[in-house]
Amino acid sequence: MSKITAAITGVQGYLPEYVLTNEELSKMVDTNDEWIVSRTGIKERRIMKDGATSDMATKAVLGLLKKTNTKAEDIDLVIVGTVTADYPFPSTANILCDKAGLTNAWGFDLNAACSGFIYSISTAAQFIETGKYKKVIVVGADMMSSIVDYQDRTTCIIFGDGAGAVMLEPNEEGLGIQDFILANDGAGRDYLVQPAGGSLNPPTIETVEKRQHYVKQEGKQVFKFAVTNMADISAEIMEKNNLSSDDVDWLVPHQANLRIIDATANRMGLSKDKVMINIQKYGNTTSGTLPLCLWDYEKQLKKGDTLILSAFGGGFTWGAVYLKWAYNS
Ligand code: UT7
């Protein structure tokens, strides 16, 4: 019997309608379009005005079921990469199963900040490769507007809201996920963090007054680690699998900053036309960036294409996935 691999067989995104432009942000904080575009590559991002992370995830999943012609009750498992769960508990996956009618699935949230999708898809693949499950959905969804401080110009310009979902199914043609490398370093926890609301600093009037329930980022430090580690791990997965830059058809990078994306592509020896970029439209949607890239570029992907997915995020967490695309759309 040939080896079972876990292949993506469909992808669907959801973006809230409201567009928050650089121009509008420049009326909220002391910033301007020129600074934001030159430092990050972002022109605009989407904001969820009504609803929660599970609502974005549900829209993406319902779209995915329709597109792949799958019955909701056939889904075995759902993993939701997110740092903006609807509640501390129950999990967003739990709520998603109810809202999307996934009556035979179980699920859990996976918190790995901007590496949420990479961690989640690598985890999900194990359930397919062992033969245990036939249909697993992996979602990357974050409503960053719920934890971003719109008085902090260093963070509010970066983040946006959005969700993407992929279907994973067994493949016996050798397509799908070939390899992954995951890493973390908790010593970086203070550089990108939501300081309050957890067990260390439960909510009090003081934590609210100090604005500790918002994302805090030391941008320069995070940038330094992101540039190095995202490029290193992408090069490492290529070397480990004897891939040259000619062998790689697409880099699917986390969309945090165009300069980090460029550095990663350069390190891998890839030209710009092989790099998926949509940061200008959506900003950094945390766990949402990678599936939203796959969704935007789906029509350009061909069966057998070699993709490297790569991300870096708070924690620190980072990782890369090497996969072979499994279908023509
Ligand atoms: O997604 C997970 C991981 N996150 C990341 O990968 C993000 C990594 N970090 C970054 O992308 C960048 O550090 C930022 C985009 C957040 C900031 O860019 P930077 O080039 O590192 O800027 P900086 O923090 O060094 O600030 C440079 C200057 C400062 O002014 P002075 O001290 O030189 O006078 C800031 O006060 O730019 C100022 N500044 C701004 N000016 C206009 C900071 N934010 C803004 C702003 N508009 N929004």
Image (cartoon, helix red, strand yellow):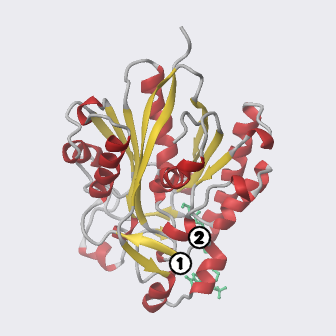
> Is residue 248 toward the left or the right of residue 12 in the image?
right
Give the image location of residue 207, x and y in percent: 31, 72
Which residue extends farthest top?
1
Is the CB–ligand 1 distance for label 2 below 8 Å? yes
Mark 2, residue position: 219
> Is residue 95 toward the left or the right of residue 297 in the image?
left
Give the image location of residue 205, x and y in percent: 24, 75
Mark 1, residue position: 154
Could you tell me if the residues under marks 1 and 2 are in contact, i.e. CB atoms within 8 Å? Answer: yes
Question: Could you tell me the amino acid type at mark 1?
Answer: Thr
* Vertical arrangement, residue 174 with respect to residue 137, above or below: above
- For label 2, count other residues whose C-alpha is less than 10 Å away and answer few (under 14), some (14-19) or many (20+): few
- For label 1, count other residues whose C-alpha is less than 10 Å away and answer few (under 14), some (14-19) or many (20+): some
Name the foreground residue: 130 vs 85.
Answer: 130
Q: What element carries label 2?
A: helix
x 72%, y 31%: residue: 241
